[in-house]
Image (spheres, rainbow, N blue to C red):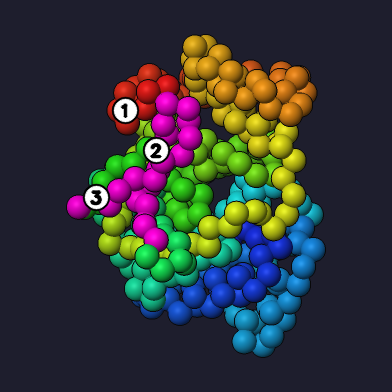
Amino acid sequence: MKVISIIIPSRNEGAMLQKTVDSFLKTKSHFFTEIIIVNDGSTDSSTTFLQSQKYKLENLRLFNTGGIGLARAKNLGASRALGDILVFSDAHIKVKPDWLDIIIKSFDIPKLDAVTPGIGSFDPGSSTGYGQNWDADLQIQWLPQPQDISPVPLAPGGFTAIKKVVFNNVGGFDPDFRSFGFEDVELSLRLWLFGYRIYTNPFVRVKHLFRKELPYHVPPIDYFYNFLRMAFSHFNLKRINKSIKLIRNCVNFERVISELVLSDVREQRKKYLKRRKHSDDWFMDKFNIPF
């Protein structure tokens, strides 16, 4: 019997965290499901509801961290997970009770290693995206609804299920990534380059709170550092130079470059190039990305 681990990193989510947990607790499935909350340095009272007797459940666990960042928080949750399938979910999500069995059925497809549902906003009448792609400037573009379960280049960090053995085999999220940004697209890129496959299942849709601002501060240098670390880890020299040009006018650009050079990115790049089954040219061509 498969065990499913739902991993929810959370920071200053307010009432949305409880609403997300309540939504998952209404799941109807014959799979054993656990919920792991990684409270990453919240300064609000978003986790106090867990002190109620209602939430003192064997399959609901809380881990408190001190602001280690999204990638490491997700990795921590995965390291504590009992499941064969890991579901990484934002802390501002609403699911339908039947979502789990439908999404897990996706893994019956040969060589499907990760899957994302349709993700739409809480706002009435808003559109739903089914996986993501990059445009010519590596800006995220949501994909339209396919007729069936279909490959997608990028799995949104807001909600993605992945085989635990695959997640562990590729090394999880990059632990050197800082507070927020690109951990989801970097992992998606790495999965494809290493020979794994990501799909979207259009028969599952979840609601997501799209905020204009995060409920915590993200230093701009962290965001741009993550972006260039992804580029240096996976792209050829031409694409690295194009990536640098995209952010060369950002705040603290010289510091971003300096800290990246002093990191382990060279060693990581060598390791990744040895492991991958496909080149970044292959990836860009396969998904018609003009970068």
Residue placed under numbered mark 1 in the picture: 288
Name the residue rendered at 62%, 87% in the picture: 54
Measured from the top left, where is residue 221 in percent x and y? Answer: 73, 33
Q: Which mark, by number, is residue 146?
A: 3
- Closer to us: 66 or 270: 66
Residue 9's spot in the image, x, y percent? 62, 58
- In the rendered view, tell whether residue 72 sits above or below residue 291: below
Along the polypeptide, which appears first: circle 3 or circle 1? Answer: 3
In the rendered structure, which amino acid carries the disc numbered 1? Asn
Look at the image and tell me in which quarter the N terminus lies: bottom left
Query: Disc 2 marks which residue?
Result: 133
Q: CA distance from mark 1 to mark 2?
A: 9 Å
| Residue farthest toward the bottom in the current orientation of the protein | 53
Image location (x, y in percent) of residue 28: 38, 78
Q: Quadrant of residue 256?
A: top right
Would you call the spot at circle 2 few (<14 residues within 10 Å), some (14-19), or many (20 or more)? Answer: many
Q: Residues within 10 Å of mark 1 (few under 14, many from 20)?
A: some
Q: Dots 1 and 2: beta carbons under 8 Å?
A: yes
Question: Residue 171, labelled with which disc?
Answer: none
Q: Is residue 176 visible?
A: yes
Residue at 49 percent across and 44 percent down: it is 167
Identity, as a three-letter code, of the amino acid under mark 3: Pro
Q: Which residues are magenta?
A: 126-147
Task: Tell how many labels.
Answer: 3
* Circle 1: element type: loop
- Pick the quarter of the image with the C terminus: top left
Q: From what the image shows, is residue 65 above or below residue 267?
A: below
Kindly state the secondary structure of the residue where label 3 is placed: loop
Of marks 3 and 2, which one's residue comes earlier in the chain?
2
Nearer to me, 284 or 242? 242
